[in-house]
Amino acid sequence: MENLIWTKYGSFDLPSYNPKLDGVAKQRYTYLMQLMHQPQIDDNYHWPIHKYDDNQKKIVATWGPPMTCAQEPRFIADPDGTEEEDGIILSTVYDFKKRTSTIVVIDPKTMTSL
């Protein structure tokens, strides 16, 4: 993941993952926000959240509607979960057009809003 930290496409920061695996197993999935990757603010501008797969060494999914700025993703593990992706991702998201912030809940398996 070292090559993802800073690129000409902005930076990737504030990683989050399932904390239930800390010290127990290798993490496969990391959830990161991407900022400052678009040179112009237009109708497609956004700071998305990416799902990085360490087995494939690449980003495998992205969440982020146009004209939004997602903040630090927080993985909340399902206490009864048996798989690494069992849980939810919480993030505060700023909507540039509405000028409001909301909390979004994202399914880590599908990277879609719940």
Image (cartoon, rainbow, N blue to C red):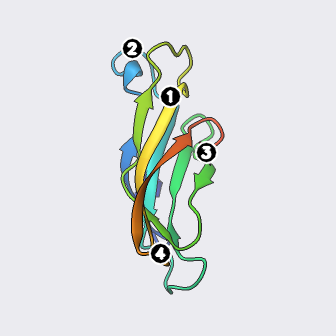
Residue bearing mark 2: 24
Q: Is mark 3 on a helix, strand or loop?
A: loop
Q: Mark 1 — residue? A: 87
Residue 8 horizontal/vertical position (percent): 47, 73
Q: Earlier in the sequence, mark 4 or mark 1?
A: 1
Residue at 59% in and 82% down: 43
On residue 111, the disc is 3
Residue at the image point whose x is 55% and y is 13% from the top: 82
Between discs 1 and 2, the one toward the N terminus? 2
Q: What residue type is labelled 1?
A: Gly
User: If you read the primary sequence from the N terminus, does the residue marked by circle 2 or circle 4 appear first?
Assistant: 2
Task: Tell me residue 59's x, y (percent).
Answer: 59, 50
* Residue designated by label 4: 98
The answer to which of 39 and 108 lies nearer the viewer is 108
- The image quadrant of residue 74 is top left
Local crowd at mark 4 within 10 Å, few (<14), some, or many (≥20)?
Answer: few
Choose top left, top right, bottom left or bottom right for residue 18. top left
Secondary structure under the numbered disc 1 in the rendered image: strand
